[in-house]
Amino acid sequence: MCIAHDHDLGEAPQAGAGRRGFLRATALLGATAAAVTALPAVTAEAASMARWRPDPRSRRFTLAVMPDTQYLFDGPSIDRAPVEASLRYLLEHGREENIVFLSHLGDLTQNGAKEEFAAIGEAFGLLDRRGVGYSVLAGNHDVRPSTTDQRGATPYLDAFGPKRFEGKPTFGGASPDGYNTFHRFAAGGREWLVLALDWRLSPQGYAWAKEVLAKHPKTPVILTTHELVVEDDTLSDYGQQLWDQLIEDHDQIFLALGGHYWPAGRATRKNAAGHDVQLHLTNYQNRYFGGAAMIRLYRFDLDRGVIDVETLSPWILGRASKGLNELERQEMELSGDADRFSVEIDFQKRFSGFAPVPARPSRPVSTMLLPGTVAYWRFEKPVDGTKGTVRDLSGRGNDLSLVTVGKGTLGWSADHHPDQPGHGSLEFQGFKSPLKGAYLRTVDGAPLSKATFEDGYTIEAFYRLPADWDPDHHAWSGLVGRTGTGGAAGKTADDPDEPLATLSLSNDREPQWAVRPLNQEGIATNWGQETPLETWWHLAVVNDGTHTTLYVEGCPVVRNPKAAAVGLTSVGLPWLLGGYEYAGKIDQILHGRLGDVRIVARALPVTSFMNH
């Protein structure tokens, strides 16, 4: 359904030039001050008063990632400014970006020295004061590289051990050695988990990680570590070990991020469940100013089924007002294929193996009979081939009878739109030439045949077209329609042989509502967009007594005419489901599935549609 969300990520709905311009423009407003080493104390104190509050319900949210910062914290060459600029950027743009979490990928420092950790620890205090959720992990430059997570006390652990995160709402816990942590955040109406693992896991570390996953069996997991991918499509030796011992058999892990190597790269592997796992290498320490504290923004859009990824340096962006040289201009935002890209993920399908979305139960007929309902048909069982009757559940007597053409048949399926009240659909098997199939028509004397709906109407239907749908044989079949021609009604403008009302599908699978209103001689037409095959769709035609609006999945289409349209012309003839008449004769039969159909003698709001 077309849903307005409470929170939006900015002015452009997808990655591209528009969003890039937005990033640059907004960064210049707030990040200029980040070029200095530290904010004045009074400003920092004031900033600490405003708490970080991402929107946990919005289906658009951002995970920020910061890779190797080691060259900025190297003995006497310590420079906190780039890191602080990136962290301030996250604070300043957290609301419009809906930034939910930050993950650092290790090698915070060059030598793992106490003074280096003191400096970067102070920089991360910007996030601590605002209550921002984040994770860090040890890289090979933060600890002795020959050791595993059982190495004991280190300056890293003193600065970024579990005590630093205690009390944060996102902190889930740490391994007994303190080098592995997990963190949880809420986004898109569900919980997500970040598993931040040490440079080298010991057997105890693997056991702890598996225990965390076992305790959160329905939570999608983003794994972060220091070493994983070595280049495009290739894991390092240790990355392969992680895959073999942890990632492959745990379907919850759908995204794994690492640094260490350069340049940036990507790999995709299928896990034991047959699902893709995205594995990304992010590291810019080899670039200008040690990477200038580049950050990756992973923008999740659950409705579009995509993660849009961008890479930028707020530190360089913030200095743009002072004028940048050519090198800096090249480095402020990266646009290479490994730095700016999109990953398509059907999140519901990807997580269905461990966190299936409960199917919406069938809803009682009584809840669908809103005031003004004049016909309601649902198909929770096959149509009896001998009696061939479908009852009108509104109780208004608009029952349907079966009509076969060319020895055609009408099938049945348990398949249905996920938001359909009734769980079942009719399977029409129409064919154009020679004409063959079966359809339904209202019985003789049905009150619906004479109804003119001067005060408005709402007509709803669910449908799905199969993969073998062919415009040469199946186009312009009707879902719901009224028989009788314009000529028979004395309305001869346009084509007088067209039926008085039809909700049909064009050769491009565009839904079309074509009718002769009471106040018009010609045909009034509402057009929807192309609707893909093998997908369930909900249509609603709503007339408020003056104008008609066609909705697809609860969203109004662009081609809704502004001209006044009052009621529906009638010559007292039946309505059809799955059939289309031309010149008073059946001309085409639907090839596809048809779910619940409802007609109400008034305009309904979107919130009262059957798919709501």
Image (cartoon, grey):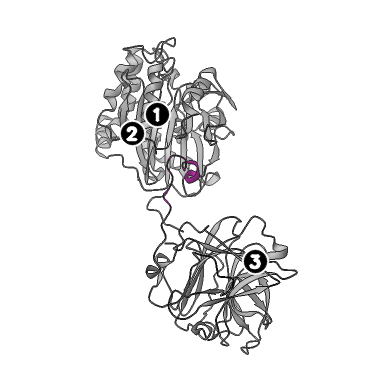
The mark found on residue 195 in the picture is 1
Q: Quadrant of the C terminus?
A: bottom left
Label 1 or label 3, whichever comes before in sequence order? 1
Alpha-carbon neighbours of circle 3 within 10 Å: few (<14), some, or many (≥20)?
some
Residue mark closest to the camera, 3 vs 2: 3
Location of mark 2 (residue): 133
Q: Amino acid at mark 2?
A: Gly
The reply to whether the magenta stretch includes residue 415 is no
* Residue 351 is covered by the magenta coloring: yes
Q: Write down the residue under mark 3.
A: 506
Residue in the picture at 51% in, 37% down: 309
Q: Amino acid at mark 1?
A: Leu
- Whether residue 422 is visible, yes or no, is yes
- Is residue 182 toward the left or the right of residue 454 in the image? left
SS type, badge 2: loop
Q: What amino acid type is highlighted by mark number 3? A: Ser
Seen in the picture, residue 385 relative to 521 is either above or below; the reply is above
In the image, 286 versus 540, the foreground residue is 540
Write down the region rendered in magenta.
Answer: 345-359
Q: In terms of image quadrants, where is residue 433?
A: bottom right
